[in-house]
Amino acid sequence: ADNRNLMGGGATGTSTTPIMGSVTSFDNRWADSVLYTSPSMSGFKAAAAYAAVAEGTTLNSQTKGRAWSLAGMYDNGPLTASLAYERHSYGSAIANSSIASPNPGTNHAPFATVTYAGKSEKAWKLGVGYSFGDLMVNGVYEKTSDDFVTSLGHKAYTLGAKYKIGSNDLKLAYTKAGDAGGVSQTGAKQWALGVDHHMSKRTKVFAQYVKLSNDTAASYGLTGAAASGAVAAQGLDADPSAWSFGMRHTF
């Protein structure tokens, strides 16, 4: 039921990036990186990160890529907010590392090859949350863009709410990804419904249901479904769904 099925890059958004090592390239944990997070100042703090990528290359004629990001975050009382920007620049070290990404159009096959060498991609993300007593609402908006030959840039948003009733939290979320690269019918939407039951201050059980609906030229999947593998969409226009049950205990 993770909104990163459609946001942060998604399975077929921007982008399935070889050198970042994940299908959700804007939500990665990078190797060879340095991060600074400022102290909290009246609820506000900032963070900056830089990553050197393609560090394993040994050819002097190749250029290595890099990535960096900036974020401002506010958390004080009933209000939380964040604004983040991230950019990936790809060197020639991945010239032969192209991937197939669904982005059909007039001049593209249903699975067009995207080459990253010498190209770049970037993303903006804004998040806001507010608590009204037992009700919490939040929203996130992102915009990704790139200069790939086959663009995967898109806009996406998610809206969510959680309502506390006694020992239970009822949760509802809606996420929508727009068309990739402006190509019609390459977006998707997702509904997620869940309930948490608090057995104590440290232990809760939960149940969740998620339904993802692809447009006729999209094939997003439930990419965060399990460590052993995703619940993949079976071709274009697929509508995967899943139940999730579990228990969480804080030591």
Image (cartoon, grey):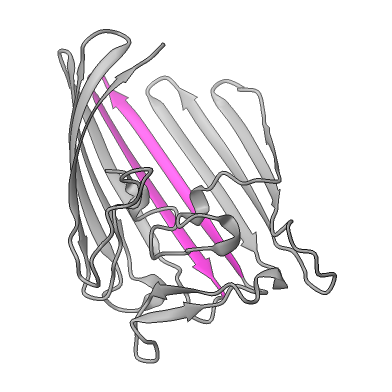
- The image quadrant that residue 101 belongs to is bottom left
- The image quadrant that residue 127 belongs to is top left
Image quadrant where one finds the C terminus: top left
Q: Which residue corresponds to the image point at 77% horizontal and 69% vertical from the top-left?
A: 63
Instruction: Residue 211: tell me if it is visible.
Output: no
Q: Is residue 28 above or below residue 45?
A: below
Q: Position of residue 162 (x, y in %)?
A: 23, 30
Instruction: Residue 26: tell me if it is visible.
Output: yes
In the rendered image, residue 75 lying in the magenta stretch gets the answer no
Q: Is residue 77 above or below residue 159?
A: above
Q: Position of residue 7 (x, y in %)?
A: 39, 53
Q: Is residue 247 left or right of residue 57?
A: left
Residue at the far top: name it: 200
Q: Which residue corresponds to the image point at 32% horizontal and 10% vertical from the top-left?
A: 202
Q: Which residue corresponds to the image point at 23% horizontal and 66% vertical from the top-left?
A: 234
Which secondary structure is most common in the magenta stretch? strand
Q: Nearer the viewer, residue 19 or 212?
A: 19
The boundaries of the magenta stretch are 120-147
Residue at the far front: name it: 228
Q: Nearer the viewer, residue 72 or 210?
A: 210
Q: Is residue 167 above or below residue 186?
A: above
Q: Which residue corresponds to the image point at 20% horizontal and 70% vertical from the top-left?
A: 237
- The image quadrant that residue 187 belongs to is bottom left
